[in-house]
Amino acid sequence: MVSLTSTVPVLDDDPYSPEILADPYPFFDRLRAAGPAVWLNAHGVHAFGRDAEVRAILEDHRTFISGAGVGIVNIHHHPPLRRPGILEVDPPIHTRMRAAMDAVIAPRRLRPRRKDFATCAKEVIDEVLATDDGRFDAARLAEKYVLRVFGDAVGIPRAGREENLLAQGAANFSTFGPQNEIARRWIAEAEGTYDWVLENCAREALDQAGMGAQIWEFADSGVIDADEATLLVRALLSAGLDTTIFAITNTLRALSLHRDQYARIHVEPRTVRYAIDEAFRFDSPFQSFYRTTSRDTVIGGVELPADTKVLVFPGSANRDASRWGRDAHVYDANRDASGHLTFGMGIHQCVGQPISRMEMDALLSAFVTRIARIEPTAAAEPLVHTTLRSYASVPLRAIPA
Ligand code: HEM
């Protein structure tokens, strides 16, 4: 039985303010403590920060749709300039786009790429060890590695990746939250990159052995149309780079702060996958997004009419003590972190998860094997973004085995 509350708890915090974005966890504590559903005055929206409600919303794609946009703007009323991609369509369109993506990113198709990932991992670690006293920035290492392995896996040309893809990804994710100064800054930085991405996603620009070309095969066989193929190749690039770069950066930062845990993983490198999963839970690279009600409904004790935006915070749900225990705020690589909401849940759950995990596993397995210890040489600098969470810089020193 759901007991309805006539008044919903209200918070005046602005989750998109620079202070909260730099360290959102105290706000997330207030959000979860206030109730299962909370009205955020700053943006006039119901927000959900507890595991149970975030999970329930994401699992019910019929009531909580993505087709009105997964950002703050209802695209049914304010149509976007660009045609929505896989993330912002509902079945049946979603079903056929997803089928093409699932087939291209199937673990069986990915496995042969593992060797290239391992070779690249070795190269970037060699570069770290060749530097002055083993000093390196985890954020730069993650960028270099992912731009190389993921760009090659998609099959886009190498020249221009660094200048265009990072800014493009960050700008894309900046459209989810309100268009405040922070979002506008990321979008301004990406000026000009959109054309590069479009040109380099075109069928003739793609390497025939890459995932981009494989998506086009689904257009040839009629599963999707040509426009949908273009959108899917673009989605690979806009959704798959920053997220994985940030996940690697966040994992290395967490491990650098827990020398004992790193030491254990160094001795037993196969356990690195638990450290990665715990880092996903602990510091989710993708912190928040929206759904829209398709009908009148009740969630977290609050009645919502149809066509209402709801804001979910997987980054907060992952720290919910009722799901993760009283030490939810502690990074513990020994924890079974499976079941976190970092990749979402339900029909839109991240389709790129297998490749992200494979990239991270190849890099971090090689890293923990060759490097006995990592230590911070200065404080990490938060990367302030309205939807993504990571660090602009994580200065570390690596001590080889
Ligand atoms: C650690 C890295 C990643 C994280 C944290 C992440 C997170 C997410 C989340 C939370 C969603 C669901 C959003 C929603 O429900 O509205 C999602 C969907 C998606 N992700 Fe990822 N992602 C990552 C890596 C990737 C990669 C590498 C790719 C591309 C190969 C990718 C492509 C996509 C696509 C296309 C969707 C939409 C799926 C759909 O709507 O069916 N992601 N991702």
Image (cartoon, rainbow, N blue to C red):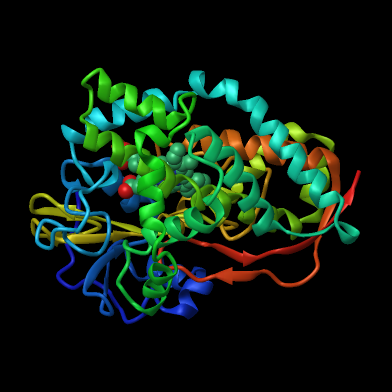
User: Furthest residue to the front?
Assistant: 204
Q: Position of residue 371 (x, y in %)?
A: 84, 45
Q: Residue at x 33, y 52 (%)?
A: 54
Compared with 219, 228 (above or below) is below
The quadrant of the rendering that contains the C terminus is top right
Image x and y of residue 356, in percent: 53, 39
Q: How many marks?
A: 0
For image coordinates 18% across by 48% down, the residue present is 67
- Vertical placement of residue 393 versus 314, above or below: below
Q: Which residue shows up at 36% across the image and 54% down it?
A: 195
Q: Is residue 35 visible?
A: yes
Q: Is residue 94 above or below residue 74?
A: above
- Taking depth in this image into account, of 310 and 73 the one nearest to the observer is 73
Seen at 29% across and 45% down, the residue is 87
- In this picture, residue 240 sits left or right of residue 391: left
- Which quadrant of the frame does ligand 1 lie within? top left
* Whole-percent x, y for residue 182 in the image: 41, 75
In front: 366, or 5?
Answer: 366
The answer to whether residue 340 is seen in the rendering is no
- Horizontally, residue 194 falls left or right of residue 148, namely left
Q: Position of residue 253 (x, y in %)?
A: 68, 58
Left or right: where does residue 66 sit relative to residue 188?
A: left
- Vertical position of residue 28 compared to residue 243: above or below: below
